[in-house]
Structure formats: structure tokens, C-alpha cells
């Protein structure tokens, strides 16, 4: 069975484009922490259709998401004739996680609430 579940943060803004058939495609890298939590694996992910559109519209760099999908491997030949190999996760479903913190400065409650 080829199934993988990962939880991590987007390492960059998702790249959204459309196929010749008009189907949305989202490519993004997910930074998944290793057991020591000081290092991460960067996993290339791809989503299609409505999932790709949702990721493109609502997920940003640094946001945590959980993905479920399958590992896909393959190869292609560059214009220079070199063979390149790739590994990626095809993600049909995901869940939203924590959004990135926008500021490290926190305002005391007494300044936020006027009473």
C-alpha cells in the first residue's frame, strides 16, 4: 500500500498553474520536522483540481498543514540529455493547521482592550 501522511509547514508560497486541459495544479514544499525537531525534511508535494485551488487561495508560506497522499517517483530527460529522477507526494486531501505568527512582538492585554 502506497500511502503517506505528513504534518509540516509550507517552506515557500505554493506555485499554482493550470494544465492544458484547464485543471489547477499546485506545487509546494512541506518542511516536516525530524524527531530531534532541530532539522526538517523538505518534501515536494503536488495537488490537482479543487484541492490545488484551495491551497493556492488559502495556504501561505509558514502555515502548518497535514497532507495525506501517495509517493510518486519518476524520471525525465533534460534538454541537455541528462536523466533526472524525482520523488514527490501526490496530495488529494489536506487539513489546515496553525497559521504562521506574523510578529514576535506581543501587545499587553491592557493596550488591546480599552477598558
Image: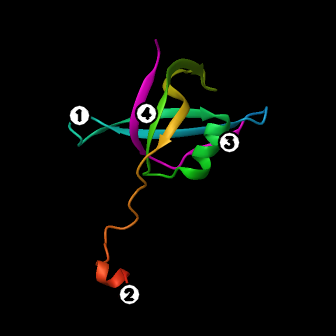
Is residue 91 left or right of 9 when viewed as pictured? right
Mark 3 or mark 1, earlier in chain: 3
Q: Is residue 14 magenta?
A: yes
Single out the mark in the foreground, 3 or 1: 1
Single out the mark in the foreground, 2 or 3: 2
- The residue that disc 4 covers is 43
Query: For the residues marked 2 and 3, what is the alpha-carbon distance in whole angstroms?
Result: 46 Å
In which quadrant of the rendered view does residue 4 lie? top left
Contact between labelled residues 4 and 2, with CB atoms less than 8 Å apart: no
> Which residue does the image show at 59% across and 34% down from the upper left?
47
Residue 35, which numbered label? 1
Q: Residue furthest top?
A: 1
- The residue that disc 3 covers is 17
Q: Secondary structure at mark 3?
A: strand
User: What colour scheme has been applied to the protein in the rendered image?
Assistant: rainbow
Q: Residue furthest bottom?
A: 115
Residue 114, which numbered label? 2
Q: Classify mark 2: residues with Cα within 10 Å, few (<14), some (14-19) or many (20+).
A: few
Amino acid at each position: 500500500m502506497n500511502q503517506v501522511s505528513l504534518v509540516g509547514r509550507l517552506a515557500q508560497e505554493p506555485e499554482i498553474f493550470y494544465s492544458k486541459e484547464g485543471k489547477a495544479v499546485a506545487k509546494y514544499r512541506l518542511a516536516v520536522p525530524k524527531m530531534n525537531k532541530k532539522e526538517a525534511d523538505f518534501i515536494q508535494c503536488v495537488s490537482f483540481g479543487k484541492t490545488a485551488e484551495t491551497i493556492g487561495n488559502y495556504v501561505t508560506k509558514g502555515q502548518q498543514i497535514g497532507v495525506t497522499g501517495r509517493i510518486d517517483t519518476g524520471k525525465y530527460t533534460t534538454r541537455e540529455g541528462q536523466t533526472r529522477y524525482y520523488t514527490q507526494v501526490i496530495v488529494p486531501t489536506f487539513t489546515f493547521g496553525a497559521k504562521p505568527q506574523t510578529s514576535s512582538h506581543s501587545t499587553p492585554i491592557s493596550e488591546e482592550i480599552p477598558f
